Amino acid sequence: MYNDDCLNAGLAELGITLTDRMREQLHTYYEMLIETNRVMNLTAITEYEDVCVKHFLDSLCLVKALPELREKADLSLIDVGTGAGFPGIPLKIVFPELRVTLLDSLQKRVLFLQKVVAECGLSDVLCVHGRAEEYSRKPEFREQYDICVSRAVTRMASLTELCLPYVNVGGKFVPYKAAEFDEELAEAKSAIATLGGAVESKQTYTVPQSDYGRTLLVVRKKKPTDKRYPRGGGKPMKQPIVSRETL
Ligand code: SAM
């Protein structure tokens, strides 16, 4: 029913092989996305091939930055500001042993995600409705994750304060960013250090089967985040910790 040539070619570039079950789960997810998108704003991208490239393959490019996804079974991952489930759901489908938390501040999107999880038969997925800067203060979420990912949520300085508190010491925060990212990264240098992180690697590449440029940054958590962070009252967004040299 679906022409998967483009998806298959992109997956081959990433060195990923789908089982029949994974393929069915991606199809079911696509159908639910399109169906629900009629009544709720989930995505501007609706053609099957476009969804495969700009949502599925883009999400799965995490393997470029984190080869351990292929090897280590027991990893926990949180997707902050997951929206309709990107990148968290494709990652969970293709790496089913990941323990995944999908967090978003918009309740109707979280209800949609709960339905996707049930319909696709995904286990070990927690869908959380809440603000990132509030949930990371709870002991059951703070510094509990090996990996924190986030795509298209906010600029790096603010995003670091939203995301790095979730990562355990030794774990990694990997934001999905635009190809042109140097200025945003320079602005976030101070936030990364203040929150206990250090940049480990930065990879810029083209998403398979497209000319769509992307940067994946890997920030390693070096020490626990100070209790003062994240700050309340919307400060991570309104007054981001910005490096002095960029002011
Ligand atoms: N990550 C998805 C993607 O790439 O398709 C969704 C991106 S959408 C542009 C941004 C999402 O972040 C929205 O669903 C929004 O509700 C969520 N969001 C924004 N600020 C947030 C916060 N402080 N805590 C949790 N979610 C947040």
Image: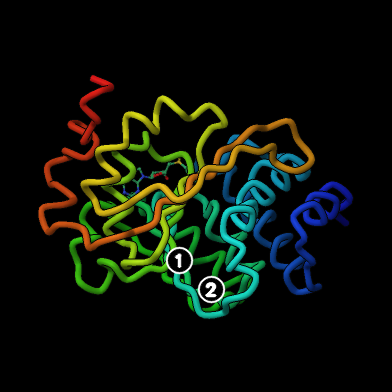
Q: Is residue 152 left or right of residue 204?
A: left
Kindly indicate the quadrant of the structure image that contains residue 116.
bottom right
Q: Secondary structure at mark 1?
A: strand
Determine crowd level at label 1: few under 14, some 14-19, many 20+ residues with C-alpha closer than 10 A.
Answer: many
Q: Which residue is depicted at the point 39% across and 56% down? A: 220
Within 8 Å: ligand 1 and the Cβ of disc 2? no
Q: Which residue is depicted at the point 17% across and 39% down? A: 234
Work out whether 229 lies above or below 96.
above
Quadrant showing the C terminus: top left
Q: Which residue is mark 2?
A: 98
Q: Where in the image, quadrant-wise, is ligand 1 located?
A: top left
Work out whether mark 2 precedes mark 1 in sequence or the reverse, and give the earlier one: 1
Q: Amino acid at mark 2?
A: Leu
Q: Is residue 82 visible?
A: no
How far is the residue under mark 2 from the one under mark 1? Answer: 7 Å
Q: Are marks 2 and 1 in contact (CB under 8 Å)?
A: yes
Q: Which residue is mark 1?
A: 77
The front one of 120 and 242 is 242
The front one of 25 and 19 is 19
Q: Which residue is depicted at the point 55% across and 73% down? A: 118
Kindly indicate the quadrant of the structure image that contains residue 238.
top left
Across and down, in percent, residue 64 comes to 64, 53
Q: How is the image coloured?
A: rainbow
Work out whether 66 lies above or below 204.
below
Within 8 Å: ligand 1 and the Cβ of disc 1? no
Q: Could you tell me how many numbered marks the image carries?
A: 2
Across and down, in percent, residue 182 comes to 45, 28
Across and down, in percent, residue 165 comes to 26, 58
